[in-house]
Amino acid sequence: MKQKIIILDFGSQTTQLIGRRVRELDTFCEILPYNKFPAEDENIIGVILSGSPLSVYDKDSFHINMDELLGRYPVLGICYGAQLIAYHGGGNVQPTATREYGRANLCSIDENDPLFKGISVGSQVWMSHGDTITSIPKDYVISASTEKVEYAAFRNEKKRVWGVQFHPEVYHTQDGLKLLRNFVVDICGSKQDWSPASFVETTINELKNTLGNDKVVLGLSGGVDSSVAAVLLHRAIGERLTCIFVDHGMLRKNEFNEVMSAYHDLGLNVVGVDASKKFFAELAGVTGPERKRKIIGKGFIDVFEAEARKLQGVKWLAQGTIYPDRIESLNITGRTIKSHHNVGGLPEKMNLKLCEPLKWLFKDEVRRVGRQLGMPKNLVERHPFPGPGLAVRILGDITPEKVRILQDADAIFINNLHSYKVKNVQGEETELYNEVWQAGTILLPVRSVGVMGDERTYERAVALRAVTSTDAMTADWARLPYDFLAKVSNDIIRNVRGVNRVCYDISSKPPSTIEWE
Ligand code: XMP
């Protein structure tokens, strides 16, 4: 039996984070829209109800049939989830005059409550709610309070139902992971057997069973997800996997050759296709970001399809799709705002079945699986990189000369991120590169005046972009050290012909995005 926790999503921004925390507890979980609770699934060991931007008494708010859950499974309601439990049981939820947002401390805790085992009075929690529970249902008792919030946590232990007004999943809740552990492990009885090692073993067996003697083709991008998917498949079916790596000419400096040789070292059967001429020709004079994306997307599929058709008897197309690509996140109207598409409808067109071995993993888990598989650091720890590559980092039209300038400037930035050492949160020495979610350089469509030696220059400007993030949905600009930025700027202006100015992008997402186009 594969134990799982179900997380019902009521539209909170932190729902995915709840999922990641549960996985950190080596427990499998699935995030589902609030109204899609599976009718029959004997593997479910507990349910978590997420937060929501809505109020339980709003006309359009999301409600569920609590009787399906309460008493049947252990249930933990978080924020809106807790309010829903209170509301449905006959308690009261009311709007507060001011939205309570930020840090608070638990000033009393019922020490008999198994949910708070090992958590002491004073522990910091993170609040983010506009409504307050003013009374709890008759058969519930208070588990914890803060100065301002009497019903910070409450429970009906007989029914195995808990509600917490604060957010245990966020970093600022000091004992949040401990609380989730108490729920997932002690209350729900997780065996904590979801680990990279067990994932690798079961997935390889499943792939062997599903694929049998079939041949599989996979598109490699040089990124973590497709590379890990390829290695897993290779372990399962060996030479029956063929990988295709298309160079559209807009990769980072030397990336095609470096990544090809890493793939060969891993024993993968890879066809490398240099299609850069085709892409440069099709992109000539094109300035619109979406148009560039369309041209590259279509060109990629054409090249991939032509190569794949050369292979005989292929039945499957494999992809490095990961879980966040597929989670149907809800917006406030209850509509799903994300749906996953296969690459350009290729599977249907080529009559191929789809194989997505990483479809249940979060990004950090993909990296853990990659390490478990013994993959080299430079593949596993690589920053995400957009499919259209440097094409969306060259603002305006693209020429081979601009790509060369950007590749050179970017290589200096990235190499410096590797060589600059810092301490991570555990106090260990690490590369600055590893402390950043994603970094890259952007070639701006402006020229500015400079002076070099006795000469006046009139050359290009580049912007450096480095962000911290957990999932690329939101991101903050990385506070890179001044001496580091000074060195990168100096190295670029001295060494990259055609650039005389370097800027640092200090915008967060939202409202900006990570890429400039
Ligand atoms: P934005 O710029 O939307 O990017 O904040 C979020 C993440 O997605 C990557 N990205 C892309 N990846 N094709 C891709 O495969 C694209 O067209 C594309 N645009 C952005 C971006 O690098 C970041 O990791």
Image (tube, rainbow, N blue to C red):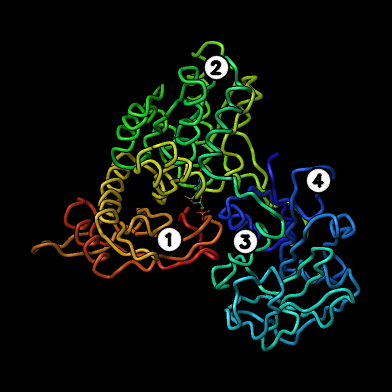
Instruction: Tell me whether circle 3 and circle 1 mark residues in contact (CB < 8 Å).
Output: no
Q: CA distance from mark 2 to mark 1?
A: 39 Å
Q: Quadrant of residue 339?
A: top right
Whether pointer 2 and pointer 1 mark residues with C-beta atoms closer than 8 Å, the reply is no
- The residue tagged with tag 4: helix, strand or loop? loop
Which residue occupies 72% across, 62% down?
A: 50
In the rendered image, the quadrant that contains the N terminus is top right
- Residue at the disc numbered 2: 215
Dot label at residue 119? none
Instruction: Tell me the crowding category of disc 4: few under 14, some 14 to 19, or many 20 or more residues within 10 angstroms, Cα based.
Output: few
Q: Nearer the viewer, mark 4 or mark 1?
A: 4
Q: Is residue 478 above or below residue 308?
A: below
- Give how far across and how far down residue 437 sits, in percent: 43, 56
Amino acid identity at mark 1: Val
- Above or below: residue 146 compared with residue 259: below
Disc 1 target residue: 467
Look at the numbered discs 4 and 1 and tell me whether their residues touch, using CB distance below 8 Å: no
Alpha carbon separation for disc pair 3 and 1: 30 Å
